[in-house]
Amino acid sequence: MHYTLHQSHHCSNGTSHEKDPQVLIQFKVLSSLKQSMKEVLNKLQATVTIHDQHLYVLQHLMTYSTS
């Protein structure tokens, strides 16, 4: 891990893209994860056969992750 970071640091030619992309990527992943969870929750709510317990747990997870 450390070696790879060292290498990419050398290849970046001193641009400002040394640390920022990592944070940006994490943020994008988190955002799309929340979006996916919302879509999944909407689909589950649309499914009549879903158990109330499962729906409750998912809603609880959603509230926790978006707060």
Image: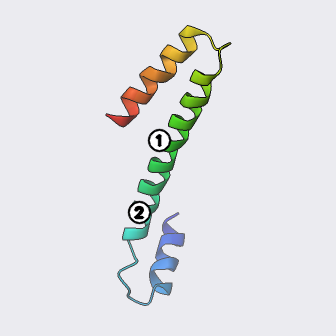
Spot occupied by residue 47 in the image (x, y as percentages of width and height): 65, 20
Q: Nearer the viewer, mark 2 or mark 1?
A: 1
Q: Is residue 16 above or below residue 34?
A: below
Q: Is residue 22 above or below residue 56?
A: below
The residue lying toward the viewer, choosing from 67 and 40, is 40
Position of the C terminus by quadrant: top left
Quadrant for residue 24, please give it.
bottom left
Residue at mark 2: 24
Q: Is residue 66 above or below residue 61?
A: below
Spot occupied by residue 44 in the image (x, y as percentages of width and height): 61, 24
At 38% from the left edge and 27% from the top edge, which residue is drawn?
A: 63
Image side of residue 45 versus residue 62, left or right? right
Q: Are marks 2 and 1 in contact (CB under 8 Å)?
A: no
Image side of residue 15 versus residue 40, left or right? left
Quadrant for residue 43, please give it.
top right
At 50% from the left edge and 35% from the top edge, which residue is drawn?
A: 38
At 52% from the left edge and 79% from the top edge, which residue is drawn?
A: 7
Residue at mark 1: 34
The residue lying toward the viewer, choosing from 52 and 22, is 52
The kind of residue tagged 1 is Lys
The kind of residue tagged 2 is Leu
Specify few, some or many for label 2: CA neighbours under 10 Å numbering under 14, 14-19, or 20 or more: few
At 59% from the left edge and 33% from the top edge, which residue is drawn?
A: 40
